[in-house]
């Protein structure tokens, strides 16, 4: 009884093997007959292999190390023209590159050239220039307080045929940079009902005058005009820092977008190279299967690996296009089909960077702090009483030495024709001035706290990004060693596979291992570059 069951199991097992082999054979036939898209690259190569086999009687297999990438790409593009494989994008890039060469343009775009264009033509670059120009304009407006003013007044009254009065006053006023205010002019008065204060004895020639006014307490050491000029000078520094903040942010955004684009192109190139090698191996496997040296299941496994790699490559191509569009949002002069430079991800670690205090954000806050200090100085000046004195020289017409006494000279200006006066003002509690000083102190405390918090934040960020850049650089050295070892293992595995001593599964594993190491290296390079850009942004130093 037990023997009969064993015989039945053996028969069932044998039937399963026969059915499985038959299905695999049918699947391969259907693949080669119904799916020309997958094997279009491989079929002409297989025919060559069979022809070579018939002529020489030996096995003619194309080992992957016998072709360089340029030759392989040319063969795949030529043989894949009839099935529209994704290599059309590479053909398009090659055509565009040829056009660039013919027109004298360079299809490789460096970060330096992109930065030069952005800082010259981007709207935010124009905005930064406009912000920087505000400072000199503010200073010019503040200096306008010292511009001389031409003043004049005229008043005339005539009623029922009587000429009541006629007054006129024309002159120049000038506020000097040293508190003294100077006025000079000419007065004229005439009529039947003239205010005695405005009566002029020499009616025909009028009366010239020169007036000097000086604040003795409030306004003597400083005033709104002098503080305004100093604030205008501070405004130049503040707006220059604000402009540098815009440029700093713009350069950082461009550097990150360029790095993302270069990384996406690098990943796409790695996937495309892997896809080409898998396609070549599929062609070799089919040739070996047709010669009876490989089972049909190896062709199935190679085909599945090619399909998976094609999907991965397509996804990488989409991500590269998205990264290109993100870069084009900042650098829209990017030529169609352009590529990053080969060392795009190899951003050098700066040997020396300026201190964090050079960051434009800190410079802008420091300028605001200085402006508040000037405002507080002016508020403190308002705590003093107002005491203004004035002295006016009066002439007969335009003669300041005229006098009724004989032998008159210039001393008459000070003894016979003058006007002197003084004004005083002081609020009893002066709460407005005291509140202004307290408010200025509060603003200074707030701005000082912001300055210290920002400085500490930038110091921490700069140190963190600096450490990250050096850490990524050390990891890249290890990854380079791993990549060399993975490439050597893959080469050994290919030789064993060609000799029939390895399997398709092991070969796929070796290729995936090398691909993973290469992708890790590209990612580390991109992360190191971004850390360097963040470091430079925190310091505010973009000099090479």
Image (tube, rainbow, N blue to C red):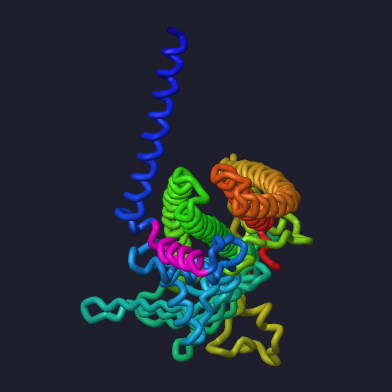
Residue at left offset 46%, top offset 43%: 297
Image position, residue 355 (x, y; %): 75, 56
Image position, residue 333 (x, y; %): 45, 73
Residue extending farthest left: 160
Relative to 541, does residue 2 appear above or below in the rendering? above
**Viewer-side residue, 449 vs 347:** 347
- Magenta-colored span: 39-55
Residue 462 visible within the image: no
Relative to 452, does residue 118 appear above or below in the rendering? below
Residue extending farthest top: 1
Question: Does the magenta run of residues contain 161?
Answer: no
Question: Does the magenta run of residues contain 42?
Answer: yes
Relative to 410, does residue 230 appear above or below in the rendering? above
Q: Which quarter of the image is occupied by the C terminus?
A: bottom right
Which SS does the magenta portion mostly show? helix
Image position, residue 439 (x, y; %): 59, 43
Q: Which picture quadrant has residue 356?
A: bottom right
Residue 59 visible within the image: yes
Residue at left offset 75%, top offset 60%: 353
**Left or right position of 216 against 287:** right
Q: How many discs mark residues in the rendered view?
A: 0
**Left or right position of 512 against 299:** right
Residue extending farthest right: 351
**Left or right position of 325 against 354:** left
Image position, residue 101 (x, y; %): 50, 83
Residue at left offset 42%, top offset 32%: 17
Q: Which picture quadrant has residue 145?
A: bottom right
**Viewer-side residue, 123 vs 204:** 123
**Left or right position of 199 against 350:** left
Q: Which picture quadrant has residue 416?
A: bottom right
């Amino acid at each position: 009884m037990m023997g009969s069951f064993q015989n039945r199991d053996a028969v069932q097992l044998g039937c399963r093997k026969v059915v499985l082999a038959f299905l695999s054979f049918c699947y391969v036939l259907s693949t080669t007959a119904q799916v020309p898209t997958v094997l279009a690259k491989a079929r002409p190569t297989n025919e060559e292999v069979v022809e070579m086999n018939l002529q020489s009687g030996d096995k003619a297999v194309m080992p992957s190390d016998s072709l360089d990438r340029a030759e392989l790409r040319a063969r795949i593009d030529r043989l894949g023209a009839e099935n529209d494989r994704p290599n059309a994008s590479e053909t398009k890039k090659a055509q565009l590159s040829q056009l660039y060469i013919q027109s004298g343009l360079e299809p490789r775009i460096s970060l330096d050239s992109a930065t030069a264009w952005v800082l010259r033509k981007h709207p935010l670059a124009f905005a930064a220039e406009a912000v920087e120009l505000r400072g000199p304009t503010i200073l010019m407006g503040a200096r306008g307080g010292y511009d001389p003013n031409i003043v004049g007044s005229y008043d005339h009254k005539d009623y029922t045929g009587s000429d009541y009065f006629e007054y006129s006053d024309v002159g120049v006023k000038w506020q000097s940079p040293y508190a003294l205010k100077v006025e000079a002019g000419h007065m004229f008065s005439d009529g039947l009902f003239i205010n005695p204060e405005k009566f002029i004895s020499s009616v025909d020639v009028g009366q010239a005058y020169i007036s000097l006014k000086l604040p003795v307490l409030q306004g003597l050491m400083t005033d709104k005009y002098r503080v305004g000029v100093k604030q205008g000078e501070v405004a130049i520094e503040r707006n220059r820092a604000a402009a540098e903040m815009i440029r700093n942010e713009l350069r950082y955004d461009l550097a990150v977008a360029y790095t993302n684009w270069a990384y996406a192109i690098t990943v796409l190139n790695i996937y495309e190279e892997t896809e080409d090698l898998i396609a070549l191996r599929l062609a070799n496997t089919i040739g070996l299967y047709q010669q009876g040296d490989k089972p049909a299941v190896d062709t199935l496994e190679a085909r599945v690996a090619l399909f998976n790699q094609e999907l991965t490559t397509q996804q990488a191509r989409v991500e590269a296009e998205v990264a290109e569009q993100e870069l084009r949002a900042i650098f829209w002069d990017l030529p169609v089909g352009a590529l990053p430079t080969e060392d795009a991800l190899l951003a050098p670690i700066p040997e020396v960077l300026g201190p964090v205090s050079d960051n434009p954000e800190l410079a802008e806050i420091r300028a605001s702090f200085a402006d508040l200090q000037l405002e507080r100085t002016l508020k403190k000046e308002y705590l003093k009483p107002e005491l203004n004195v004035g002295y006016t020289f009066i002439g007969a017409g335009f003669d300041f030495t005229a006098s009724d006494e004989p032998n008159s000279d210039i001393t008459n200006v000070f003894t016979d024709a003058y006007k002197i006066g003084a004004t005083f003002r002081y609020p009893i509690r002066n709460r407005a001035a005291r509140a202004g000083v307290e408010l200025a102190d509060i603003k200074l405390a707030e701005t000082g706290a912001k300055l210290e918090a920002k400085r500490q934040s930038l110091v921490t960020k700069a140190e963190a990004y600096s450490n990250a850049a050096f850490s990524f650089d050390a990891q890249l050295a290890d990854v380079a060693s791993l990549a060399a070892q993975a490439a050597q293992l893959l080469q050994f595995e290919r030789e064993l596979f060609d000799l029939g001593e390895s399997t398709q599964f092991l070969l796929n594993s070796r290729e995936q291992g090398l691909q993973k190491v290469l992708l890790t290296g590209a990612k580390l390079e991109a992360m190191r570059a971004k850390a360097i850009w963040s470091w430079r942004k925190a310091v505010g130093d973009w000099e090479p």
